[in-house]
Amino acid sequence: MAYKHLFGPVPSRRLGISLGVDLVAHKVCSLNCVYCEVGATTNLTIKRKEYVPAQEVISELSDFLKNKPELDYITFSGAGEPTLNSKIGAIINFIKKKYPHYKLSLLSNGTLFYDEAVRKEVGGVDLVLPSLDAVTSAAFLKINRPNPNLKLGKIIDGLIQFRMEYPNTTMWLEVFIVPGINDTTAEISKMKQVLTKISPDRIQLNTLDRPGTADWVQPASKQQLLEIKNKLEPLPVEIIAKFKSARKYSSYKKDIEKTILETISRRPCTDKDLCEILGLHINELNKYLRELQQKDKITSERLKRGIFFRAKQNN
């Protein structure tokens, strides 16, 4: 069975072996973050609806899980914001009832947690991983470029409320550092105040792995991240920007890595080109691109049609 809404399992820096569940069409999101490696948002919305049919997702999950695969998590993620799908609660309930031995996680930008319905629908997952990159309006607008109806204060209040209502759901909150915007002493000081109120189980500092949507975004250095970590302590802070090699995971397929290199050796390709050629979801492809960049086997260049990847000549 070919899956439209499932991808992977893929090796994840935070979640081990994770089966991805994509609940919206490509780049349906409430934010248009400058660092997003999936690409620019094409439908900047906060309207919740059944963007992909829940019954199709349930059918695919039933087919995939009937063989009892070994998974660390089933993860709601994908190429957009999963909480925009109004049926996410029904899908979560289906998995918890039919396959209760699997852990569920949610990768979310956290923008819709102000909605009581959203909190109720996703409160039953084992692990929620929202993001909060800015606590001042100026930084929020520059980094996250939100739907105009989103208000930062409301987003923060939603995260605080979720934490209060669902204390048994583990929360790892990601802060993506964009140097020159949210790494100043003043920004980090205000961030610390807000994070203290939210009180997540972990605060995870991240920065650019590969080219994002905006070409001016640069990664923070290890030293910069360490300094920010020190400023945020004694809150439970960790740096996740450098992840373990995907080669350690059995689901990392060497033949796919080889095919990517062979393809871009013949001609440069964008990530979208490679997704079409290889039949991979963008999130899955990104795991391989990160690994190849880490091993210094590929280069990237931003051109008019997007970011093109090339194999290095010495490979």
Image: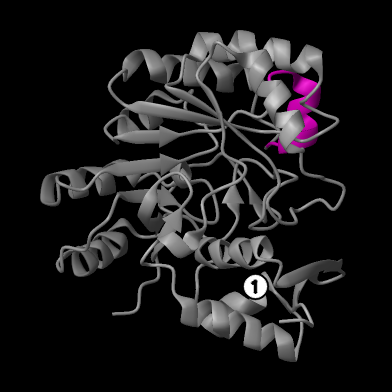
Residue 278 visible: yes
Viewer-proximal residue, 38 or 84? 38
Q: Is residue 70 left or right of residue 24?
A: left
Residue 134 visible: no
Task: Name the quadrant of the C terminus.
Answer: bottom right
Graded by Cα atoms within 10 Å as few (under 14), some (14 to 19) or many (20 or more), the crowding at tag 1 reads some
Residue 151 place in picture, x, y as percent: 65, 23
Q: Is residue 301 magenta?
A: no
Q: Is residue 59 left or right of residue 204?
A: left
Tell me which colouring the rendered structure shows.
one colour
Viewer-proximal residue, 112 or 248? 248
Q: Residue at x 65, y 60 (%)?
A: 294
Q: Residue at x 47, y 27 (%)?
A: 113
The residue at the far bottom in this view is 266
Q: Residue 211 lies in what quarter of the image?
A: bottom right
The residue at the far front in this view is 314
Main secondary structure type of the part rendered in magenta: helix
Stretch in magenta:
135-146
Residue 193 place in picture, x, y as percent: 62, 8
Residue at mark 1:
272
Q: Is residue 310 left or right of residue 48?
A: right
Q: Is residue 189 left or right of residue 58?
A: right
Q: Residue 61 lies in what quarter of the image?
A: bottom left
Q: Amino acid at mark 1?
A: Lys
